[in-house]
Image (tube, helix red, strand yellow):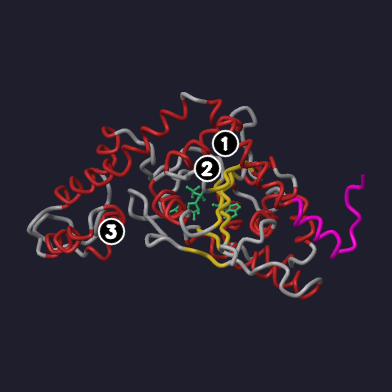
Amino acid sequence: MTRKRILSGMQPTGELHLGNYLGALKNWVNLQAEYDCFFCIVDQHAITVPYDQKALPKLVDDMAISYLAAGIDPSRATVFVQSAVPEHTELAWYLATVTQYGELGRMTQFKDKTEQAGSESGASAALFTYPVLMAADILVYKATHVPVGDDQTQHLELARNAAQRFNSRFKKGFFPEPAGLYSPTPRIMGLDGLKKMSKSIGNHIAMLEEPKPLWKKLSGAYTDPQRTTQDEPGRPELCNLYRMHTALTPAERLPVIAEQCRSASFGCGHCKRELETSLNAELEPVRARAKELRANPERLRQILGDGAATARAVAFETLREVRELMGIRGPTR
Ligand code: ADP
Ligand code: TRP
Protein backbone atom coordinates (compact mmCIF):
# COMPACT_ATOMS: atom_id res chain seq x y z
CA MET A 1 0.00 0.00 0.00
CA THR A 2 1.31 3.48 -0.79
CA ARG A 3 1.85 5.72 2.19
CA LYS A 4 -0.44 8.65 2.79
CA ARG A 5 1.04 11.85 1.43
CA ILE A 6 1.46 15.24 3.07
CA LEU A 7 2.09 18.62 1.55
CA SER A 8 2.48 21.80 3.54
CA GLY A 9 4.18 25.15 3.14
CA MET A 10 4.87 28.51 4.72
CA GLN A 11 5.47 31.90 3.23
CA PRO A 12 9.01 33.27 3.46
CA THR A 13 7.93 36.48 5.12
CA GLY A 14 10.30 36.57 8.10
CA GLU A 15 11.39 34.61 11.12
CA LEU A 16 9.16 31.85 12.40
CA HIS A 17 7.61 32.16 15.84
CA LEU A 18 6.35 29.77 18.49
CA GLY A 19 2.86 29.81 16.94
CA ASN A 20 4.25 28.52 13.63
CA TYR A 21 6.45 26.04 15.46
CA LEU A 22 3.88 24.62 17.89
CA GLY A 23 0.90 25.03 15.55
CA ALA A 24 2.50 23.55 12.43
CA LEU A 25 6.22 22.87 12.09
CA LYS A 26 6.65 20.60 15.13
CA ASN A 27 3.73 18.57 13.81
CA TRP A 28 5.43 18.25 10.39
CA VAL A 29 8.53 16.89 12.08
CA ASN A 30 6.52 14.24 13.93
CA LEU A 31 4.56 13.24 10.83
CA GLN A 32 7.67 12.42 8.80
CA ALA A 33 7.78 8.91 10.22
CA GLU A 34 4.32 8.03 9.02
CA TYR A 35 3.74 9.95 5.78
CA ASP A 36 5.39 10.59 2.47
CA CYS A 37 6.16 14.30 2.99
CA PHE A 38 6.53 17.34 0.73
CA PHE A 39 7.37 20.64 2.42
CA CYS A 40 7.70 23.77 0.35
CA ILE A 41 8.59 27.39 0.86
CA VAL A 42 5.84 29.26 -0.92
CA ASP A 43 7.68 32.24 -2.41
CA GLN A 44 4.98 32.83 -5.04
CA HIS A 45 2.41 33.31 -2.28
CA ALA A 46 4.67 35.86 -0.59
CA ILE A 47 4.53 38.21 -3.61
CA THR A 48 0.74 38.62 -3.50
CA VAL A 49 1.20 41.65 -1.21
CA PRO A 50 3.79 44.43 -1.52
CA TYR A 51 7.23 42.95 -0.75
CA ASP A 52 10.93 43.70 -1.09
CA GLN A 53 12.37 41.80 -4.06
CA LYS A 54 15.94 42.31 -2.83
CA ALA A 55 15.17 40.70 0.50
CA LEU A 56 13.15 37.75 -0.83
CA PRO A 57 15.99 35.35 -1.79
CA LYS A 58 17.48 35.49 1.70
CA LEU A 59 14.06 35.09 3.30
CA VAL A 60 13.58 31.92 1.28
CA ASP A 61 16.92 30.51 2.48
CA ASP A 62 16.13 31.51 6.07
CA MET A 63 12.83 29.66 5.88
CA ALA A 64 14.52 26.55 4.50
CA ILE A 65 17.04 26.75 7.36
CA SER A 66 14.17 27.02 9.85
CA TYR A 67 12.44 23.93 8.45
CA LEU A 68 15.62 21.89 8.60
CA ALA A 69 16.67 23.25 12.00
CA ALA A 70 13.29 22.31 13.45
CA GLY A 71 13.96 18.72 12.44
CA ILE A 72 12.70 18.26 8.89
CA ASP A 73 15.00 15.56 7.58
CA PRO A 74 15.83 15.81 3.86
CA SER A 75 16.56 12.08 3.73
CA ARG A 76 12.94 11.41 4.66
CA ALA A 77 11.04 14.45 3.33
CA THR A 78 11.16 16.46 0.11
CA VAL A 79 12.05 20.09 0.89
CA PHE A 80 11.88 22.60 -1.96
CA VAL A 81 10.95 26.09 -3.10
CA GLN A 82 7.53 26.52 -4.79
CA SER A 83 8.85 28.54 -7.74
CA ALA A 84 11.35 25.77 -8.58
CA VAL A 85 8.34 23.70 -9.68
CA PRO A 86 6.44 25.76 -12.30
CA GLU A 87 3.73 23.10 -12.48
CA HIS A 88 2.16 24.67 -9.36
CA THR A 89 1.21 27.86 -11.19
CA GLU A 90 0.09 25.99 -14.27
CA LEU A 91 -2.23 23.78 -12.24
CA ALA A 92 -3.50 26.87 -10.38
CA TRP A 93 -4.80 28.22 -13.68
CA TYR A 94 -6.63 24.99 -14.46
CA LEU A 95 -8.10 24.83 -10.94
CA ALA A 96 -9.24 28.44 -11.24
CA THR A 97 -11.60 27.24 -13.95
CA VAL A 98 -13.40 25.02 -11.41
CA THR A 99 -13.31 27.55 -8.55
CA GLN A 100 -16.15 29.98 -8.05
CA TYR A 101 -15.59 33.72 -7.82
CA GLY A 102 -18.03 33.92 -4.89
CA GLU A 103 -16.13 31.25 -3.02
CA LEU A 104 -12.94 33.31 -3.20
CA GLY A 105 -14.80 36.40 -2.07
CA ARG A 106 -15.78 34.66 1.17
CA MET A 107 -12.20 33.95 2.29
CA THR A 108 -11.62 35.64 5.62
CA GLN A 109 -7.84 35.85 5.15
CA PHE A 110 -8.40 37.95 2.02
CA LYS A 111 -10.77 40.20 3.93
CA ASP A 112 -8.32 40.55 6.85
CA LYS A 113 -5.36 41.32 4.61
CA THR A 114 -7.22 43.87 2.51
CA GLU A 115 -8.61 45.49 5.65
CA GLN A 116 -5.07 45.86 6.98
CA ALA A 117 -4.01 47.43 3.67
CA GLY A 118 -7.05 49.72 3.75
CA SER A 119 -8.57 48.84 0.37
CA GLU A 120 -10.16 45.78 -1.15
CA SER A 121 -10.34 46.99 -4.73
CA GLY A 122 -6.65 47.96 -4.69
CA ALA A 123 -5.57 44.46 -3.62
CA SER A 124 -3.78 42.41 -6.25
CA ALA A 125 -5.69 39.83 -8.24
CA ALA A 126 -3.02 37.40 -7.03
CA LEU A 127 -4.04 37.99 -3.42
CA PHE A 128 -7.62 37.24 -4.37
CA THR A 129 -6.68 33.99 -6.13
CA TYR A 130 -4.09 33.02 -3.49
CA PRO A 131 -6.18 30.05 -2.24
CA VAL A 132 -6.30 28.58 -5.77
CA LEU A 133 -2.50 28.47 -5.88
CA MET A 134 -2.56 26.87 -2.44
CA ALA A 135 -4.98 24.23 -3.75
CA ALA A 136 -2.58 23.61 -6.66
CA ASP A 137 0.38 23.25 -4.24
CA ILE A 138 -1.51 20.44 -2.54
CA LEU A 139 -3.20 18.73 -5.48
CA VAL A 140 -0.19 18.72 -7.80
CA TYR A 141 1.24 16.03 -5.46
CA LYS A 142 -2.17 14.41 -4.94
CA ALA A 143 -1.57 14.96 -1.24
CA THR A 144 -4.09 13.33 1.10
CA HIS A 145 -3.27 15.37 4.22
CA VAL A 146 -2.22 18.94 4.96
CA PRO A 147 -0.76 19.81 8.37
CA VAL A 148 -1.51 23.47 9.19
CA GLY A 149 -2.73 25.70 12.00
CA ASP A 150 -6.49 26.22 12.30
CA ASP A 151 -6.38 29.57 10.46
CA GLN A 152 -6.00 27.61 7.19
CA THR A 153 -9.23 25.59 7.52
CA GLN A 154 -11.18 27.73 5.07
CA HIS A 155 -8.42 27.53 2.44
CA LEU A 156 -8.38 23.77 2.75
CA GLU A 157 -12.12 23.62 2.26
CA LEU A 158 -11.64 25.50 -1.01
CA ALA A 159 -8.96 22.99 -2.09
CA ARG A 160 -11.36 20.13 -1.36
CA ASN A 161 -14.12 21.83 -3.38
CA ALA A 162 -11.76 22.34 -6.32
CA ALA A 163 -10.72 18.66 -6.18
CA GLN A 164 -14.34 17.57 -6.03
CA ARG A 165 -15.43 19.71 -8.97
CA PHE A 166 -12.44 18.70 -11.06
CA ASN A 167 -13.15 15.03 -10.36
CA SER A 168 -16.82 15.25 -11.18
CA ARG A 169 -16.14 17.19 -14.39
CA PHE A 170 -13.08 15.29 -15.68
CA LYS A 171 -12.37 12.03 -13.89
CA LYS A 172 -13.86 10.38 -10.85
CA GLY A 173 -11.37 9.94 -8.00
CA PHE A 174 -8.51 11.72 -9.82
CA PHE A 175 -7.56 14.08 -6.99
CA PRO A 176 -7.85 13.02 -3.34
CA GLU A 177 -9.85 15.46 -1.20
CA PRO A 178 -7.11 16.62 1.16
CA ALA A 179 -7.83 16.62 4.90
CA GLY A 180 -6.34 18.98 7.48
CA LEU A 181 -4.05 17.56 10.14
CA TYR A 182 -3.97 19.76 13.21
CA SER A 183 -1.38 19.77 15.95
CA PRO A 184 -2.55 19.40 19.56
CA THR A 185 -1.97 23.18 19.83
CA PRO A 186 -3.48 24.52 16.57
CA ARG A 187 -3.73 28.08 17.90
CA ILE A 188 -1.14 29.80 20.05
CA MET A 189 -2.12 33.25 21.23
CA GLY A 190 0.33 36.15 21.14
CA LEU A 191 2.14 37.59 24.14
CA ASP A 192 -0.63 40.21 24.31
CA GLY A 193 -3.17 37.42 24.90
CA LEU A 194 -5.56 39.16 22.50
CA LYS A 195 -4.75 37.90 19.00
CA LYS A 196 -3.14 34.78 17.60
CA MET A 197 0.63 34.95 17.68
CA SER A 198 1.68 36.48 14.36
CA LYS A 199 4.79 38.06 12.93
CA SER A 200 2.78 40.87 11.37
CA ILE A 201 1.52 41.97 14.81
CA GLY A 202 4.84 41.63 16.62
CA ASN A 203 3.31 39.80 19.59
CA HIS A 204 5.62 36.84 19.17
CA ILE A 205 8.62 34.93 20.46
CA ALA A 206 10.82 33.78 17.57
CA MET A 207 11.53 30.08 17.17
CA LEU A 208 15.24 30.91 17.05
CA GLU A 209 15.09 33.44 19.90
CA GLU A 210 18.22 33.39 22.08
CA PRO A 211 17.68 32.59 25.80
CA LYS A 212 17.99 36.19 27.07
CA PRO A 213 15.41 37.90 24.83
CA LEU A 214 13.26 34.77 25.13
CA TRP A 215 12.96 35.28 28.87
CA LYS A 216 12.46 39.01 28.49
CA LYS A 217 9.44 38.42 26.24
CA LEU A 218 8.07 35.47 28.16
CA SER A 219 8.24 37.26 31.50
CA GLY A 220 5.97 40.00 30.12
CA ALA A 221 3.46 37.62 28.53
CA TYR A 222 -0.20 37.83 29.30
CA THR A 223 -1.73 34.90 31.25
CA ASP A 224 -5.26 34.34 32.61
CA PRO A 225 -6.95 37.77 32.31
CA GLN A 226 -8.83 37.27 35.58
CA ARG A 227 -5.74 36.53 37.59
CA THR A 228 -4.54 40.00 38.44
CA THR A 229 -2.71 39.11 41.66
CA GLN A 230 -0.80 36.03 42.72
CA ASP A 231 -3.35 35.22 45.46
CA GLU A 232 -6.18 34.74 43.01
CA PRO A 233 -6.68 31.25 41.60
CA GLY A 234 -5.90 30.91 37.88
CA ARG A 235 -7.60 28.90 35.14
CA PRO A 236 -4.98 26.89 33.28
CA GLU A 237 -7.48 25.79 30.64
CA LEU A 238 -7.78 29.43 29.55
CA CYS A 239 -4.11 30.30 29.83
CA ASN A 240 -2.00 30.49 26.67
CA LEU A 241 1.16 29.66 28.62
CA TYR A 242 -0.37 26.51 30.04
CA ARG A 243 -1.23 25.53 26.45
CA MET A 244 2.46 25.87 25.60
CA HIS A 245 3.33 23.74 28.64
CA THR A 246 1.10 20.98 27.27
CA ALA A 247 3.18 20.94 24.06
CA LEU A 248 6.60 21.19 25.69
CA THR A 249 6.76 20.19 29.34
CA PRO A 250 7.02 16.51 30.42
CA ALA A 251 3.47 15.12 30.80
CA GLU A 252 3.89 14.16 34.46
CA ARG A 253 4.48 17.82 35.39
CA LEU A 254 1.23 19.06 33.81
CA PRO A 255 -1.20 18.15 36.62
CA VAL A 256 1.22 19.68 39.14
CA ILE A 257 1.48 22.95 37.20
CA ALA A 258 -2.31 23.10 36.73
CA GLU A 259 -2.88 22.52 40.43
CA GLN A 260 -0.35 25.18 41.46
CA CYS A 261 -2.22 27.64 39.26
CA ARG A 262 -5.74 26.71 40.44
CA SER A 263 -4.82 26.77 44.11
CA ALA A 264 -2.80 29.98 43.76
CA SER A 265 0.05 28.32 45.61
CA PHE A 266 2.48 29.72 43.04
CA GLY A 267 2.30 32.85 40.90
CA CYS A 268 2.55 33.12 37.13
CA GLY A 269 6.24 34.05 37.39
CA HIS A 270 7.01 30.59 38.73
CA CYS A 271 5.03 28.94 35.94
CA LYS A 272 6.83 31.08 33.36
CA ARG A 273 10.23 30.03 34.69
CA GLU A 274 9.31 26.38 34.22
CA LEU A 275 8.06 27.13 30.70
CA GLU A 276 11.35 28.93 30.00
CA THR A 277 13.22 25.74 30.94
CA SER A 278 11.02 23.63 28.66
CA LEU A 279 11.34 26.09 25.78
CA ASN A 280 15.12 26.26 26.03
CA ALA A 281 15.38 22.46 26.22
CA GLU A 282 13.28 22.22 23.05
CA LEU A 283 14.87 25.08 21.15
CA GLU A 284 18.55 24.70 22.01
CA PRO A 285 19.13 21.92 19.44
CA VAL A 286 17.05 23.88 16.90
CA ARG A 287 19.24 26.97 17.38
CA ALA A 288 22.38 24.85 17.08
CA ARG A 289 21.25 23.21 13.83
CA ALA A 290 20.33 26.61 12.37
CA LYS A 291 23.84 27.93 13.09
CA GLU A 292 25.40 24.89 11.47
CA LEU A 293 23.28 25.26 8.32
CA ARG A 294 23.99 28.97 8.06
CA ALA A 295 27.68 28.14 7.99
CA ASN A 296 27.14 25.69 5.13
CA PRO A 297 25.28 27.35 2.24
CA GLU A 298 26.47 24.66 -0.19
CA ARG A 299 24.62 22.00 1.77
CA LEU A 300 21.45 24.10 1.70
CA ARG A 301 21.70 24.56 -2.10
CA GLN A 302 22.05 20.83 -2.50
CA ILE A 303 19.08 19.95 -0.30
CA LEU A 304 16.81 22.41 -2.12
CA GLY A 305 18.11 21.28 -5.52
CA ASP A 306 17.47 17.61 -4.76
CA GLY A 307 14.06 18.44 -3.28
CA ALA A 308 13.02 20.39 -6.38
CA ALA A 309 14.06 17.51 -8.67
CA THR A 310 12.01 14.98 -6.70
CA ALA A 311 9.00 17.30 -6.49
CA ARG A 312 9.17 18.17 -10.18
CA ALA A 313 9.10 14.57 -11.29
CA VAL A 314 5.80 14.04 -9.43
CA ALA A 315 4.29 17.37 -10.51
CA PHE A 316 5.27 16.80 -14.15
CA GLU A 317 3.33 13.55 -14.25
CA THR A 318 0.22 15.10 -12.64
CA LEU A 319 0.22 17.93 -15.18
CA ARG A 320 0.60 15.51 -18.07
CA GLU A 321 -2.55 13.72 -16.86
CA VAL A 322 -4.45 16.93 -16.12
CA ARG A 323 -3.79 18.41 -19.56
CA GLU A 324 -4.88 15.21 -21.22
CA LEU A 325 -8.10 15.08 -19.19
CA MET A 326 -8.86 18.72 -19.96
CA GLY A 327 -8.07 18.55 -23.68
CA ILE A 328 -5.18 20.97 -23.34
CA ARG A 329 -2.23 20.44 -25.66
CA GLY A 330 0.54 21.76 -23.41
CA PRO A 331 4.21 22.03 -24.29
CA THR A 332 5.03 20.04 -27.44
CA ARG A 333 8.39 18.60 -28.25
P1 ADP B 1 1.80 34.44 10.44
O1 ADP B 1 0.37 34.56 10.85
O2 ADP B 1 2.72 34.66 11.59
O3 ADP B 1 2.15 35.28 9.23
P2 ADP B 1 1.65 32.23 8.65
O4 ADP B 1 0.31 32.68 8.21
O5 ADP B 1 2.80 32.34 7.70
O6 ADP B 1 2.02 32.92 10.02
O7 ADP B 1 1.51 30.70 9.09
C1 ADP B 1 2.37 29.61 8.79
C2 ADP B 1 1.82 28.36 9.47
O8 ADP B 1 1.81 28.50 10.89
C3 ADP B 1 0.38 28.01 9.07
O9 ADP B 1 0.24 26.60 9.03
C4 ADP B 1 -0.44 28.57 10.20
O10 ADP B 1 -1.66 27.89 10.34
C5 ADP B 1 0.48 28.33 11.39
N1 ADP B 1 0.27 29.37 12.43
C6 ADP B 1 0.50 30.69 12.29
N2 ADP B 1 0.24 31.37 13.44
C7 ADP B 1 -0.16 30.42 14.33
C8 ADP B 1 -0.56 30.49 15.71
N3 ADP B 1 -0.58 31.63 16.39
N4 ADP B 1 -0.91 29.33 16.32
C9 ADP B 1 -0.87 28.15 15.65
N5 ADP B 1 -0.50 28.02 14.35
C10 ADP B 1 -0.15 29.14 13.69
N1 TRP C 1 -1.63 29.74 3.08
C1 TRP C 1 -0.63 29.19 3.94
C2 TRP C 1 -0.34 30.18 5.08
O1 TRP C 1 -0.68 31.35 4.99
C3 TRP C 1 0.65 28.87 3.20
C4 TRP C 1 0.45 27.84 2.15
C5 TRP C 1 0.57 28.02 0.79
C6 TRP C 1 0.16 26.47 2.36
N2 TRP C 1 0.38 26.85 0.16
C7 TRP C 1 0.12 25.88 1.06
C8 TRP C 1 -0.09 25.71 3.48
C9 TRP C 1 -0.18 24.53 0.87
C10 TRP C 1 -0.38 24.34 3.30
C11 TRP C 1 -0.43 23.77 2.01
O2 TRP C 1 0.26 29.80 6.05
Kind of residue sitting beneath label 3 = Thr
Name the residue that disc number 3 marks.
246
Q: Position of residue 158 (x, y in %)?
A: 64, 66
Look at mark 2 in the image and give the residue it sits on: 74
Q: SS for tag 3?
A: helix
Q: Residue at x 60, y 58 (%)?
A: 111
- Residue 96: give x, y in percent of width and height: 76, 60
Give the image quarter of residue 70.
top left
Query: Which residue in the structure is indicated by mark 1?
Result: 303
Residue in the foreground of this view, choosing between 21 and 49 = 21
Report, in whole angstroms, how far the alpha carbon at label 3 lies from the one at label 2.
28 Å
Left or right of residue 184: residue 10: right
- Around disc 2, counting alpha carbons within 10 Å, would you say few (fewer than 14), some (14 to 19), or many (20 or more)? some
Estimate the spatial distance between the alpha carbons at disc 1 and disc 3, rounded to whole Å: 33 Å
Looking at the rendered structure, the number of numbered marks drawn on it comes to 3
Q: Which residue shows up at 10% across the image and 60% down it?
A: 264
- Residue drawn at x 27%, y 47% is 221
Q: Are marks 1 and 3 in contact (CB under 8 Å)?
A: no
